[in-house]
Every structure is written in structure tokens, then in C-alpha cells.
């Protein structure tokens, strides 16, 4: 145990098993103890300030200490601290929020099903897809197609849909029946000399070939993030989703929209589907729904899914799915206040203004760098890919962990970013201003120069 470890760190190390953390590194170095939030900044136990350019885990859209959300939660706790949605129960907050979510998503005549996490929301969409097809006399339509490099959560089905080896390695996943097609990475997957239109045609053809090979009567749904997040922040090429959905419609396959990261303004529209031209049958919502001030999430479903549930239970049985804390009145109150803030402060307009400024500052920080190959993104969601040779795009050897090295150096300079392999992610709170953008850019420059020097000197 490090000699300078604090009481909090010692207790944490003794009793806390961390998510997505290397246990040996944690034992050597201890955890970073965050004690306070201040807008887009967090403060550790020593008093050091960091600008969190990842909004925590892509989620703290309104920063880390929004007083209105705190008051909304406190007021609701005094009125009704908990109730459930089983057996026909509800509460005023959940009822009002369900209506609001149908309205803001544009899922006309649809309904909202509440859960407590994005993983549960994505798993719920899969179960509903199975129910939908079985109720139409097509029970063999069970397989789910996701994409390489996708991330859809940590439960067993959600992990199986992930196209990331790190989500499968320790657990014997994916389950059978979960397939992965090409991801729309223009930097890595698009071939030399291939036009954007031809790239889209090839991606759609790859999907169709998989469907035909597996058998259309075995495929239930295709799930996609509008902009891939944890896979390296990958916006799709123009026309990608219309081309994909043409294939899905041909073979009677549902389209599931994972809006866990992209929803609630992140891409410069209320939802990522608007940004990329997706028309889904179901949408999973989480993270930004409460700015992660309460563990609430939801699935908004189209009328045909609602009808399938009703038809399946027309003999008097009950829909056999649900979670204890779904439709939680405090979570619903916080979500309603969050959405109200988005509307009152025109968060979508703010993202449209700040997004290009962030991109320009990141470009300024990375232009001419001998280890930067690509800058990509949309809205307030960007990735900087580090490479050994920018002229060819040749990647660093994975074992060198160059992305993680840069993220560590950024942290030393008071900047929180995320390394996804060798792509550095930027997904700051949606409340950032010009001063915050300059702070992010300036601290990135310092971390990048440090990393360039270490690469040049072969110390990493």
C-alpha cells in the first residue's frame, strides 16, 4: 500500500471492487478520490481542480452540482420517497414523465417503459423484440445484430451485444445468437480510394450478406448507437442509416436505437437519431435523462411494440418484465427537472454553438502532432486518434498503451479524458462555455507534448 494513501483510499482498497479498473494498478497507486463538483469541474480530496471533459461517464450533462436537480430530488423525497410500477401502480411523476419522453423523442402514439440503467434499457429492447416477433407467429426470429466496436452495457445480453473484446473476455461471452457486423469507421474501415457512398453501399451489403447467411427468419433486430461512443467516437458516413434501414425493412428486422450517450442534446439535436437519419422502432434512454443525478433510464417504444405486448396478454396474463426501482418517483422528478432545464436553457442550441468551438480548439491543439492521425465527432462528442505514423495511419502497438499514457498525463495537468484504445475521448458537460473549451484545449496541448516527448525518447 502506498505510504501516502489517505484513509478513504485505504478503506476503498480494502473493500471496494471497482468497475473497469486494473486491480494491480489500483493496489499500487490507489484511487482518485473526488469530493466535490463545481459546474464542469471536479475537485479531489487534496483540493486540486480538474475539468472533466468526459462528463463523468458521458453523463453529467448539467455538470456536477446543479442545485435545481438537488432541490427537485429533495422535494420529492419529502413527498414520496419510493413507489413501484408493478400491478398497475404508478405515481404522478412517472406518469407525467412517460408522456414527456414520448413527446420529445417523437415516438408518436408510443409508450415509455422505465428501467434503472442503460444496460437494462438495451436488454429490455431485446426482450421486446423477441416478444414482438413471437406474437406475430415468428418465434424463430431471435438473433440480434450489433456492430464491431459497439458498446451497449454490462448485463449479460447487453455485454453480448457489445463489439468489444474487453466486455467478453472474462465471462465467456457473447452468448450465441448475438452477431456483429462491420462498424462505420471512415478512418479505419473505409478502403483507400473508396468514396463515402461506396463505403455505405459496402457496409449495407455486409449486413445483408450476414442476414442471408444466418437466415432472415432467425434475425429479430439490429441495434446501433447513432454515433458510436466507447468504440472510439465514430460518426457514421452520410446516408449510412437510411441504407441500413432499407436492408432491415426488406427482411422484417426491427431497428433498436441506443441513445444512452447520444440522447438529450449530445450530438446537437435532441436525439442522435435526428443527427444521423435513423427511424427506430424502440429507443433506449439513460445518462442524460437525469444528468446521472439519479439512476433512472427508459425505453420508448413505437405503437406496434405496445400492441404486441397488449395482444400477448389479452387473455388476462401480465407482462412478465420489470424492475423494483423502475418509475421511481424521485428519479422521475429529477428527470422532469433535467428535461425542463434542457428546454429553458436551450441546451441543443448551446451544443450547436459550442460544438464547433470545441472541434476548432481540439484541431488547434493537435494540428501537426507527430502522433495524431484523426480528429472526428459531432456536437459535443469528439475523438482524437493517436497513431505511430499519421501519414499512413499505422497504429501504435496495443501493448504500449499510448492512449492510456496520454490520459494519465492529462490528469496530471487537471484534465479528465478517456482513452479508448488509442482514441482520446472528449464528451464534456453540455454547459461548458468558451473559457472551459480553452482550458480543455490548453491542458490537452500540455499532455500531448508530454506524450510526444515520451514517444520520441522511447520511454513509453
Image: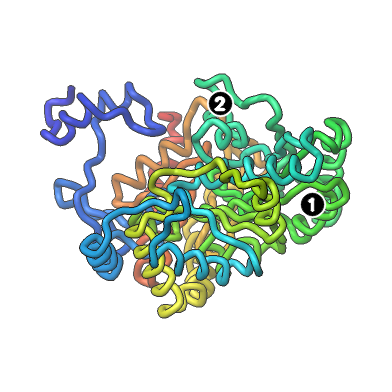
**Can residue 441 be seen by looking at this rendering?**
no
Work out whether 34 lies above or below 160: below
Say which residue appears at 65% left-offset and 50% top-offset: 309
**Residue 238: x percent and y percent?**
75, 61
Residue 10: mark in rendering: none
Residue 244: mark in rendering: 1
455 displayed left or right of 74:
right
Quadrant of the snapshot with the N terminus: top left
Could you tell me which secondary element the residue under label 2 belongs to?
loop
**Residue 89: x percent and y percent?**
43, 55
**Residue 199: x percent and y percent?**
81, 50
Say which residue appears at 39% left-offset and 74% top-offset: 341
Say which residue appears at 69% left-offset and 40% top-offset: 130
Quadrant of the snapshot with the C terminus: top left
**Can residue 357 be seen by looking at this rendering?**
yes
How many residues crowd around disc 1 within 10 Å: few (fewer than 14), some, or many (20 or more)?
Answer: many
Could you tell me which secondary element the residue under label 1 belongs to?
helix
**Is residue 334 or residue 411 the one in the foreground?**
334
**Residue 73: x percent and y percent?**
27, 62
Work out whether 269 lies above or below 222: below
Q: Which residue is mark 2?
A: 168
State how far apart marks 1 and 2 are (Cα).
26 Å
Of labels 1 and 2, earlier in sequence is 2
43 displayed left or right of 376:
left
Task: Count the labels in the image.
Answer: 2
Amino acid at each position: 500500500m502506498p505510504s501516502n494513501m489517505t484513509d478513504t483510499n485505504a478503506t476503498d482498497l480494502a473493500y471496494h471492487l471497482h468497475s473497469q479498473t486494473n486491480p494491480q494498478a489500483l493496489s499500487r497507486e490507489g484511487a482518485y478520490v473526488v469530493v466535490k463538483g463545481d459546474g464542469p469541474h471536479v475537485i479531489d480530496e487534496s483540493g486540486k481542480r480538474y475539468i472533466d471533459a468526459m462528463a463523468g461517464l458521458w453523463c453529467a450533462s448539467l455538470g456536477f452540482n446543479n442545485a435545481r436537480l438537488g432541490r427537485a430530488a429533495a422535494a420529492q423525497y419529502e413527498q414520496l420517497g419510493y413507489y413501484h410500477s408493478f400491478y398497475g401502480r404508478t405515481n404522478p411523476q412517472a406518469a407525467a414523465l412517460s408522456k414527456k419522453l414520448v413527446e420529445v423523442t417523437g415516438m408518436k402514439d408510443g409508450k415509455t417503459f422505465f428501467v434503472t440503467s442503460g444496460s437494462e434499457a438495451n436488454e429490455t429492447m431485446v426482450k421486446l423484440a423477441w416478444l414482438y416477433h413471437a406474437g406475430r407467429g415468428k418465434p424463430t426470429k431471435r438473433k440480434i445484430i450489433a456492430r464491431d466496436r459497439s458498446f451497449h452495457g454490462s448485463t449479460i445480453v447487453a455485454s453480448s451485444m457489445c463489439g468489444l473484446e474487453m466486455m467478453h473476455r472474462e465471462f465467456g461471452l457473447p452468448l450465441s445468437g448475438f452477431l456483429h457486423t462491420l462498424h462505420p469507421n471512415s478512418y479505419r474501415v473505409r478502403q483507400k480510394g473508396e468514396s463515402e457512398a461506396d463505403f455505405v453501399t459496402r457496409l449495407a451489403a455486409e449486413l445483408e450478406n450476414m442476414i442471408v447467411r444466418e437466415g432472415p427468419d432467425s434475425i429479430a433486430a439490429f441495434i446501433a448507437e447513432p454515433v458510436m461512443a466507447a468504440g472510439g467516437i465514430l460518426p457514421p458516413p452520410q446516408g449510412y442509416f437510411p441504407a441500413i434501414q432499407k436492408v432491415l425493412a426488406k427482411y422484417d428486422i426491427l431497428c433498436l436505437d441506443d441513445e444512452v450517450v447520444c440522447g438529450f442534446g449530445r450530438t446537437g439535436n435532441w436525439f442522435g437519431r435526428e443527427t444521423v437519419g435513423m427511424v427506430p422502432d424502440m429507443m433506449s434512454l439513460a445518462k442524460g435523462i437525469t444528468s446521472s443525478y439519479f439512476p433512472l433510464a427508459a425505453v420508448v417504444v413505437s405503437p406496434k411494440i405496445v400492441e404486441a405486448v397488449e395482444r400477448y396478454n389479452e387473455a388476462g396474463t401480465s407482462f412478465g418484465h420489470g424492475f423494483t426501482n423502475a418509475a421511481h418517483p424521485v428519479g422521475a422528478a429529477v428527470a422532469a427537472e433535467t428535461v425542463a432545464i434542457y428546454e429553458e436553457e436551450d441546451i441543443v442550441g448551446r451544443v450547436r454553438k459550442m460544438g464547433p468551438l470545441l472541434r476548432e480548439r481540439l484541431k488547434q491543439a493537435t494540428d501537426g502532432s507527430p502522433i495524431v492521425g484523426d480528429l472526428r465527432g459531432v456536437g459535443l462528442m469528439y475523438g482524437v486518434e493517436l497513431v505511430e505514423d499519421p501519414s499512413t495511419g499505422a497504429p501504435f502497438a496495443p501493448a504500449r498503451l499510448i492512449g492510456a499514457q496520454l490520459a494519465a498525463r492529462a490528469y496530471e495537468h487537471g484534465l479528465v479524458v478517456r482513452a479508448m484504445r488509442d482514441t482520446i475521448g472528449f464528451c464534456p458537460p453540455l454547459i461548458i462555455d468558451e473559457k472551459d473549451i480553452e482550458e480543455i484545449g490548453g491542458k490537452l496541448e500540455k499532455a500531448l507534448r508530454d506524450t510526444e516527448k515520451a514517444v520520441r525518447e522511447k520511454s513509453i
